Structure formats: structure tokens, C-alpha cells
Image (cartoon, rainbow, N blue to C red):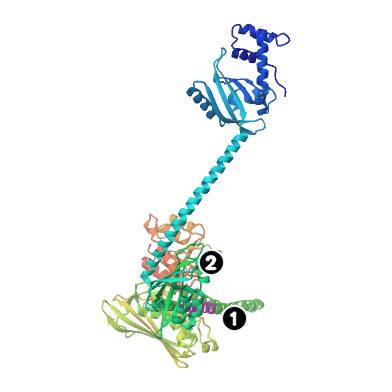
């Protein structure tokens, strides 16, 4: 190892330590000159001392006792410890300060320890352990025996330093070993405590289980599977026999076999024997703390149901100690059997519902495809006879008939869902029963005339013609019944609607009976119980070639029941059918206005200006042509926002009425209606609005009314219904003769 020659400052400090202060400056100059060949005795002495310190087996360090803690000297052993070759390299490695020699995480602790030891010792001695970091990064533990000294050239520290890494690691290993031994001892003590507690807890748990079972269980026994012992705590009249009216222990295996042979129903013996064996008990209680088994016993030839509950009250690791409780469960078993029956009924009903759904879908598929097939077929035929006007006219008539049949099916399916929905509501509106009957006659007149059927109505016996009811739903009810009657009555037959008042009730109520009867093909006794099920049609109706969905009577029944009434069917094959609807209705004495004829309606509405709001281009074209063909002036808008803007700019009375689609971009019909109703100009805000929408449910109609509209009509447009609705709406707004709304 190379080493720097002693420099001026080092010799100066050595001389100071040797108490040679008299001519220190001269001595230093002489020392500097004498480093060559001629050296004074005291310099030789200083050099010899330095060589002695260099060859010391342990590390030796001298540094100034000031804030900088500048290094004065480090011997070779200390340099090797830090992996430095020269004192200059060591000074550079440490920053020429004791602070750089100590591992940075230990510095504050080391310096505080040194200061404290020196302040408390008259000999100015200190001992401290700390770490240093070598040049290769390895951390060493060292022992530092230090001394504080006063010298003529200032206060210094000198320290004897030795590598204590192996000693420290050995101490740490011993400490760890000691800690492990102590932890092991603590674990043993804890285990002993736990075992002692487990013993007492098992006893307490056993008593708790027994106390808990005592409430509901008539017999309670404790068993130890390891020792094959069983001890009774409480015995019933049944089990006490096995213990000879004493509470002496018995063998568990003997008790189980004797109990099964004596009491258990023969059909349940194998089941109970299996579940009460020691092997099965251990297996069950390994995964669950308790388990049950229900079985039958015979007592004096009387069948009883018992429950055995087995509870683990011992160790979880070794299933041995158990408590067994017996109790009667006749009532519970009875409830379970009843519940089972209910579940079986529910399953049966669910299967019936699935069957009904499948039948419904099958019939729907058939009844939709039939008119669609006709539409496709006649369309193809028409395409082959484009030059034959008569053939084209014939095919168009057939397409129109099939389209109406398809629309009728869709309407009825929607009405079926609507009438069966939870939100199906019945209005309570002033109306006239004879008027409703006349509306039905007018609606079905063409169908009756085509078959030369005499279609009459009789309401002559009514005391109160004016009632409170839901006119729309009541009219639908009678329409479905009368339509069915006409459809299944042969040419030249008759159909009759009769309304009568059976009984007057308090508070202006009365019992009304409406009868729809015919002399048609009739219904068999076997089928009459199924006539209200969807898509049900008797074979004689299908063989006769009469088209139908089988939905009309289902909807009629739903409406009748929603109105709080009843419907009854009577029929004889080949003679005819009679449907009787009975309703409890509130009466009043204000007759309804006379119904207007279609010609009267057209005359009164002719020339009125209408705002038509429709986003579908084809529908807009068709509806505009229909309205203009009936004498109306028509302005159009393709969304609700444009309609609102047109109405804002219009003059009061300019538009007699608005026909509003619902599902539109930008702003839908409901939003547009609310915006118009919020106009500050009252004359504009009160313009009648009728919804024209493909949304045909009752909930859709209610949403339209709630948004401020006056009426709601489903698409496709039925022109007579549209005109009648427009007339009634305008009449309600006092606009029938063209006055502003």
C-alpha cells in the first residue's frame, strides 16, 4: 500500500502532542527542511511515532474537535478498512471530515453520544458503535474508543477504531435466536392458556346448547363418539324407556340401533341409521356446526313426524362431543307439504303460461302471415296485369281487405295488452248509452249490409239514458261483441243489441244489462268455457271460412271486468249466441248532444286552417292530401320546434286546430304541446291540439292529455273518427263556426 510522506501539518500536530511548543514555528521550518537527509532528534521522534501509528493493527484516527471536524491523521489499518490507498484518497473519500467518515444515518446519534459521554466523564473518554460505508458500498459496523485532548494547537479527538461487523452480526444472531426462543415460550404459554380456555369453553358451549335446545326439544342427550358413550339430560316418555327411567350412561351405538328399531317408521330406518352413524356425524359436522334430519315414528299406530338435531359442542379438529335434541314437527311438515303443493301448482301454472305463450305466438304467426301472404300474392298478380284496370282494381281491393285484416289483428293485440295492463284505467265521464249503441250500429252497418243481416238496437225500456261511464271503452266492448255476432251469423240472419235497466240503487246508481244476441252458427258446450282465451277459435268457425283472431272476446271480457261488471255467454250450436253484460253505473239527467252526420261535420269544418306536424315524409304527404281533399287549408311542420315557432308568429284565430305527431326529432309532440300551452298570448295557447301517433296504448293517450292535448288518435288514420274528433274538439273550444279558439 502506498502512503503519503508525513506533511508539515501532521508533524506540527505530532510535535504539539509531544509537548514541544517552544520554537514551534522554527521547528516546523526545520522539519520542512529536514525531510531530506538531516533531521533533528525531535523530528525523527515525530516521524518514528507516525510510523508506529501506521503499523498499528487497529485503526487510528485523529481529527479536530471543532465544527468542521477536519481529519488530521488516519493510519494504514483505517485506510484499508475504508478501501483507500493513501491519506489523500481517504481525505477525498470522507470530505476531509469525521462527518464524512460516519454512515450518514448514524451521524447525529454518534456525535450526540460522544458529546454526552465526554460531558459526563472526567477522563474525556467515549465509546460508540456506528456504521461506515466503504468505497465499494459495503456497510461495516465499527467500535470507536475515543479521547478528547487539549493541545497547544487546538482541541482534538483521537480514536482507536476496530471492525466490529462480525461481532455485531453475531450479536444480532444471538438476539434473534433469543427473541425466537422467547416467542416460542410465549406461544407455548398461549397454547396452554387456550387449551385451558377451550376446555372451559367446551363445557360452557355444551351447557349453552343444552339450554337452547331445552326450549323447543323434548329430549336432549349428550354423546362422546370417541368413548361410545351417551348420557341423557332430558328424556321424553318415548326415550326414557331406553334408559330404564334412569340417567345412567349407555353406549351410543347401542342406543341408536335400539331407538331406530323401537320407534322409527320401517320405511325411514335405513335413512336414519345412515345419518346417525358416528362416521356420518363426523363428516357432516366437519363442515357445519349443526345439522337436522326429519323422519317418521309410530306411536300407538299413529304416525308422527320428528326432527333430530345434532350439534358439535367439542373441538373443531376432532369431532367427538355432540348434543342431540328430539322434537315433534307435525305442524311444520304439514306446512311444508302445503307449500310443496303450492309450488307444484305454481309450476303447473307456469307450464300452462308457457304453453299459452307458445300457442299465442304460434297463432300470431299464423294470423299475421295469412293476410301478409295475400298482400304479397295479390301485389305480384297486380304487377303482371298493369295494363288491365279491372284486374288492378280487383287486386287492390283484395290487398286493401288483407291490410285491414292485418291492421285489425295488430290493433286487437295492442288492445289486449292495453286491457290487461296494470295501468288500465276507466274514466268516469258523462255520456249517453243510446248514443253509444247508435255509434256501434253506424260503425258496423256496412259489414251487416254486406251480409244482408238485420242489425237492430233497442233501448226503449231505459229509465235513465244518460250515465257516467267510460264511453270509449264501453263502445269498444259493444263493438267487439256485435262484430263477433255479425261475423258468425249467416247471410240473411239477424243481430240485436238490447239495453235495459234492471234495478235502481241508492245514490243515483242503477244496474244496466246490455245483451248482444244473434241467430248465427253458435258455440258448443265443450268450447264455451274457453271462449275468452286469446286466439281460441272453435273448429266450426275455422271450417266455415270465417276469418278471425280469437282476441275480440278476450278484450271484451277484460274491459267488462275493469268496469266492475260481468259478462255471460249462452249459446247453442246451429241456433245462435247470447252475450249478457251487467254493469253498475251512475245515472244523470243531462242528455248528450245529438250526434252529427258526416256530411254535417264536413260542412261545418270546410275551409278551416290546420297546422299538420309530422316528421315522416310519406305520412306527411298522405295526411296533407286527405285533409286538403276534405276542404281544409293545411300548413305543415316537420318537428315540434318548427311547429312552436309557426304558432308564435301566427295571428289569433289563424289556425283552428293542430294535428300533432308524437315521436319527432328536435322536439317531440308532448314537448311542443307544453310549449304552446305556455304562450303568454291566451288566444294562441288555447288552440286545440289532437295527437296523431302510432303509440296506441292507454298510457300513451294519458301522456298526451297530460301534456295539454285535447285528444289522442292512433295511426293509421280512420278518416270518419278523425273528423268526428275534430268536430267535438272544436265544439268544446267554441270554434265550430269559425270563431277563434
Q: Residue at x 67, y 24 (%)?
A: 76
Relative to 607, say whether 174 is above or below: above
For the N terminus, the quadrant is: top right
* Residue 209 on image: x %, y %: 40, 66
Q: Which residue is mark 1?
A: 394
Q: Secondary structure at mark 2?
A: helix
| 178 displayed left or right of 477 | right
Q: Is residue 357 magenta?
A: yes
Rendering quarter of residue 30: top right
Overall secondary structure of the magenta stretch?
helix
Callout 2 crowding tier (Cα within 10 Å): few <14, some 14–19, many ≥20: few
Mark 2 and mark 1 residues within 8 Å of each other at the beta carbon: no
Q: Secondary structure at mark 1?
A: helix
Relative to 109, say whether 591 is above or below: below
Foreground residue among 217 and 244: 244
For the C terminus, the quadrant is: bottom left
Q: Is residue 350 in view from this perspective? A: no
Number of the label disc, if any, that sits on residue 33: none
The span picked out in magenta is 344-359
Number of the label disc, if any, that sits on residue 619: 2
* Residue 527 on image: x %, y %: 48, 88
Most distant residue in the left direction = 506
* Residue 681 on image: x %, y %: 38, 55
Amino acid at each position: 500500500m502506498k502512503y503519503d510522506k508525513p506533511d508539515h501539518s501532521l508533524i506540527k500536530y505530532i510535535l504539539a502532542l509531544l509537548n514541544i511548543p517552544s520554537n514551534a514555528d522554527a521547528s516546523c521550518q526545520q522539519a520542512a527542511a529536514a525531510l531530506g537527509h538531516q533531521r533533528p532528534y525531535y523530528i525523527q521522534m515525530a516521524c518514528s511515532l507516525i510510523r508506529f501509528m501506521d503499523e498499528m493493527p487497529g485503526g487510528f484516527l485523529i481529527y479536530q474537535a471543532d465544527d468542521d471536524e477536519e481529519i488530521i491523521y488516519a493510519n494504514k489499518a483505517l485506510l484499508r478498512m475504508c478501501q483507500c490507498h493513501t491519506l489523500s484518497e481517504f481525505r477525498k473519500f470522507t470530505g476531509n471530515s469525521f462527518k464524512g467518515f460516519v454512515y450518514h444515518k448514524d451521524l447525529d446519534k454518534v456525535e450526540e453520544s460522544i458529546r454526552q459521554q465526554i460531558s459526563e466523564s472526567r477522563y474525556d473518554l467515549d465509546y460508540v458503535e456506528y456504521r461506515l460505508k466503504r468505497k465499494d458500498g459495503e456497510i461495516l459496523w465499527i467500535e470507536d474508543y475515543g479521547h478528547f485532548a487539549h493541545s497547544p494547537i487546538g482541541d482534538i479527538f483521537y480514536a482507536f477504531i476496530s471492525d466490529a461487523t462480525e461481532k455485531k452480526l453475531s450479536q444480532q444472531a444471538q438476539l434473534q435466536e433469543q427473541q425466537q426462543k422467547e416467542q416460542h415460550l410465549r406461544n407455548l404459554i398461549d397454547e396452554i392458556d387456550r387449551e385451558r380456555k377451550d376446555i372451559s369453553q367446551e363445557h360452557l358451549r355444551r351447557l349453552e346448547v343444552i339450554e337452547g335446545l331445552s326450549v323447543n326439544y323434548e329430549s336432549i342427550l349428550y354423546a362422546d363418539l370417541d368413548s361410545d358413550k351417551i348420557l341423557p339430560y332430558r328424556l321424553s316418555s318415548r326415550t326414557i324407556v331406553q334408559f330404564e327411567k334412569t340417567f345412567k350412561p349407555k353406549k351410543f351405538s347401542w342406543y341408536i340401533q335400539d331407538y331406530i328399531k323401537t320407534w322409527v317408521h320401517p320405511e325411514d330406518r335405513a335413512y336414519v341409521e345412515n345419518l346417525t352413524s358416528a362416521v356420518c356425524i363426523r363428516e357432516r359436522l366437519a363442515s357445519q356446526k349443526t345439522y337436522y334430519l326429519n323422519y317418521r315414528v309410530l306411536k300407538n299406530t299413529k304416525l308422527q313426524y320428528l326432527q333430530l338435531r345434532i350439534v358439535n359442542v367439542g373441538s373443531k379438529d376432532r369431532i367427538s362431543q355432540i348434543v342431540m335434541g328430539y322434537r315433534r314437527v307435525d305442524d311444520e311438515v304439514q306446512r311444508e307439504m302445503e307449500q310443496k303443493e303450492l309450488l307444484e301448482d305454481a309450476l303447473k301454472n307456469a307450464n300452462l303460461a308457457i304453453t299459452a305463450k307458445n300457442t299465442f305466438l304460434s297463432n300470431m304467426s299464423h294470423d299475421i302471415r295469412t293476410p301478409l301472404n295475400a298482400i304479397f300474392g295479390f301485389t305480384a298478380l297486380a304487377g303482371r296485369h298493369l295494363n288491365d284496370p279491372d284486374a288492378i282494381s280487383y287486386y287492390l281491393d283484395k290487398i286493401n281487405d288483407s291490410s285491414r285484416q292485418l291492421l285489425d289483428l295488430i290493433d286487437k293485440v295492442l288492445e289486449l295488452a292495453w286491457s290487461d295492463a296494470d295501468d288500465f284505467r276507466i274514466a268516469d265521464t258523462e255520456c249517453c248509452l243510446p248514443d253509444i249503441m247508435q255509434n256501434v250500429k253506424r260503425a258496423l252497418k256496412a259489414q251487416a249490409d254486406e251480409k244482408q243481416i238485420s242489425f237492430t238496437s233497442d233501448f226503449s225500456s231505459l229509465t235513465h239514458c244518460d250515465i257516467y261511464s267510460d264511453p270509449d271503452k264501453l263502445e269498444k266492448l259493444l263493438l267487439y261483441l256485435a262484430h263477433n255476432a255479425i261475423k258468425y251469423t249467416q247471410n240473411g240472419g239477424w243481430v240485436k243489441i238490447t239495453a235495459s235497466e234492471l234495478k235502481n240503487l241508492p245514490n243515483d246508481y242503477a244496474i244496466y244489462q246490455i245483451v248482444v244476441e244473434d241467430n248465427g252458427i253458435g258455440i258448443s258446450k265443450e268450447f264455451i268455457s274457453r271462449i275468452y282465451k286469446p286466439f281460441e277459435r272453435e273448429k266450426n268457425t275455422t271450417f266455415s271460412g270465417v276469418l278471425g283472431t280469437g282476441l275480440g272476446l278476450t278484450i271484451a271480457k277484460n274491459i267488462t271486468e275493469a268496469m266492475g261488471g260481468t259478462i255471460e255467454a249462452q249459446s247453442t250450436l246451429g241456433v245462435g249466441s247470447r252475450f249478457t253484460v251487467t254493469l253498475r253505473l251512475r245515472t244523470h239527467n243531462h242528455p248528450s248532444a245529438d250526434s252529427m252526420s258526416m256530411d254535417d261535420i264536413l260542412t261545418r269544418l270546410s275551409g278551416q286552417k290546420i297546422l299538420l306536424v309530422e316528421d315522416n315524409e310519406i305520412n306527411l304527404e298522405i295526411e296533407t292530401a286527405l285533409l286538403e281533399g276534405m276542404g281544409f287549408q293545411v300548413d305543415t311542420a316537420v318537428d315540434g320546434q318548427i311547429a312552436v315557432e309557426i304558432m308564435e308568429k301566427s295571428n289569433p284565430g289563424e289556425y283552428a286546430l293542430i294535428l300533432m305527431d308524437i315521436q319527432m326529432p328536435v322536439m317531440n309532440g308532448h314537448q311542443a304541446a307544453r310549449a304552446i300551452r305556455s304562450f303568454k298570448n291566451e288566444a294562441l295557447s288555447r288552440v286545440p291540439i289532437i295527437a296523431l301517433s302510432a303509440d296506441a296504448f292507454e298510457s300513451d293517450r294519458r301522456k298526451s292529455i297530460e301534456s295539454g292535448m285535447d285528444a289522442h288518435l292512433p295511426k293509421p288514420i280512420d278518416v270518419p273518427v278523425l273528423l268526428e274528433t275534430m268536430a267535438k274538439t272544436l265544439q268544446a273550444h267554441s270554434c265550430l263556426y269559425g270563431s277563434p279558439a
